């Protein structure tokens, strides 16, 4: 077995789902502030903080540009927009609609990327999930241009033989 030579490039676009979730959080916080039995001046101060945070999130989302997440299989490290080398941590959160990637830099700094389904194309999201769940099989598939469905079938064969 050998590792794939070319890096896997994932183009991360700003997620509408995460943006709407943040706006939902602002609405829930505002409703809670209305219902809280506190002084009016405290409510106004809290509303100001929530409004400033909401405006910050809206500005960030409007100004955000697509980012490139690259995985270099030969070295086993990741890069976000050609920044420092990041190594994946042992535990990753992977579901069908959401991937949370935990990465650590050489200097000890940690990075966490939340990647919902709408931030990548369907194929790229699938490749990322497979790379995080089954790293060896995904690297072999990348190197040999095997379709992702074949990896699923191979994993299902292995799982059914174990049980």
Image (spheres, rainbow, N blue to C red):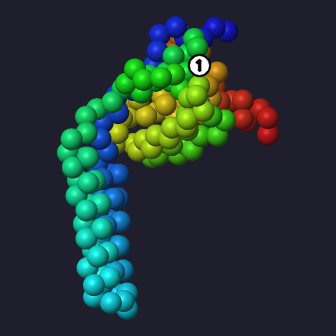
Judge whether residue 72 can be spotted in this image. Answer: yes
Residue at x 35% of width, y 65% of height: 25
Residue 31 location (% of width, % of height): 31, 79
Q: How many marks?
A: 1
Which residue is the extreme one toward the right?
Answer: 163
Q: Quadrant of the N terminus?
A: top right
Residue 148 in view here: no
Above or below, 41 against 79 in this view is: below
Q: Residue at x 25, y 71 (%)?
A: 48
In this view, the residue in front, 159 or 50, is 50
Q: Where is 62 relative to 29, above or below? A: above
Looking at the image, which is closer to me, 73 or 2? Answer: 73
Residue drawn at point x = 48 percent, y = 28 percent:
127
In the picture, the quarter occupied by the C terminus is top right
* Res. 45 image quadrant: bottom left
Q: Is residue 22 left or right of residue 140?
A: left
Name the residue tied to disc 1: 76
Instruction: Give the residue at x 59% y 40%.
Output: 92
Residue 68, percent across and down? 36, 26
Q: Nearer the viewer, residue 100 or 149?
A: 100
Q: Residues within 10 Å of mark 1 (few under 14, many from 20)?
A: few
Q: Secondary structure at mark 1?
A: loop
Q: Quadrant of residue 158?
A: top right
- Tell me the quarter of the picture where residue 39 sits: bottom left
Q: Picture coordinates of residue 57 (x, y %)?
A: 28, 53
Position of 9 with respect to 150 (left or right) is left
């Amino acid at each position: 077995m050998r590792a794939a030579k070319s890096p896997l490039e994932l183009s991360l676009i700003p997620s509408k789902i995460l943006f709407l979730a943040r706006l939902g959080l602002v609405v829930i916080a505002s409703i809670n502030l209305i219902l809280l039995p506190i002084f009016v001046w405290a409510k106004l101060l809290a509303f100001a903080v929530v409004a400033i945070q909401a405006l910050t999130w809206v500005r960030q989302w409007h100004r955000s540009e697509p980012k490139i997440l690259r995985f270099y299989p030969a070295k086993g490290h990741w890069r976000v927009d050609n920044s420092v080398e990041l190594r994946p941590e042992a535990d990753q959160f992977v579901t069908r609609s959401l991937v949370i990637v935990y990465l650590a830099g050489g200097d000890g700094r940690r990075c966490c990327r939340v990647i919902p389904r709408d931030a990548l194309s369907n194929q790229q999201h699938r490749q990322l999930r497979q790379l995080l769940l089954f790293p060896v099989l995904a690297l072999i598939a990348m190197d040999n241009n095997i379709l992702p469905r074949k990896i699923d079938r191979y994993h299902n064969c292995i799982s059914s033989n174990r049980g």
